[in-house]
Image (tube, grey):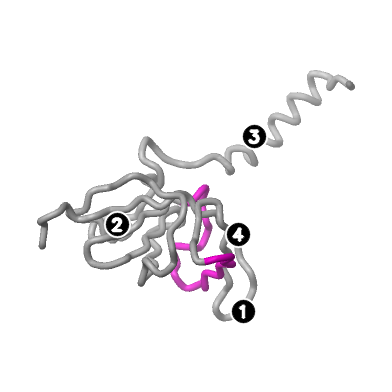
Amino acid sequence: MAKLNPIAAAMLVILTAPLIASCAPAGGAEPGAAALTPKQAETLDKQLAGKVPGKPEKCLPTFRTTDTIRVSDNILLYRANGSLVYRNDLKGSCPGLARDSDIMVTRQFGSSTCSGDFFHLVDRSSGIRGPTCVLGEFVPYRKPAGDEG
């Protein structure tokens, strides 16, 4: 195996550090919690208000949801009904997802959408394909039993 001289190794580190850093997830302790705008935080709070998170699920049967809500470039919500919403923290950022102007194109094989499935964005006006994004696990948020509000 060939050895790099120290100068070449240092240059390799300097040149690739920004690229590697751009792949790292942003944020703190809670996935997807980093860098939400006030409007995005308000949307997330409104949709999850009064609901309690459950055990993450790998797949979500598509018949369970009626609406997809784009919270940020990292967070999608799938609304099943007024008392059940699934939160999906993507496996990495999906630049442009929060704009809500691009079309989400999902290839589905079967009747479920699962963690690890890909989707991509397509510009609504030009038809140009944008980034490919990867879904994370689906965390159900339910209103506690007996809570009618």
Q: Residue at (48%, 50%) from the top-left corner?
A: 136
Which quadrant would the C terminus be assigned to in this image? bottom left
Q: Residue at (50%, 52%) from the top-left corner?
A: 115
User: In the rendered image, which residue does mark 2 sit on?
Assistant: 44
User: In the rendered image, which residue does mark 4 sit on?
Assistant: 132
Q: Nearer the viewer, mark 4 or mark 1?
A: 4
Left or right of 50: which side holds 70? right
Q: Where's residue 57, x and y in %?
A: 41, 49
- Residue range in magenta is 90-110
Cα gap from disc 4 to disc 1, whole angstroms:
17 Å
**Kind of residue indicated by mark 4:** Thr
SS at badge 4: strand
SS at badge 1: loop
Instruction: Say above or below: 128 vs 96.
Output: below
Q: Where's residue 140, x and y in %?
A: 32, 53
**Does label 2 or label 3 sit earlier along the sequence?**
3
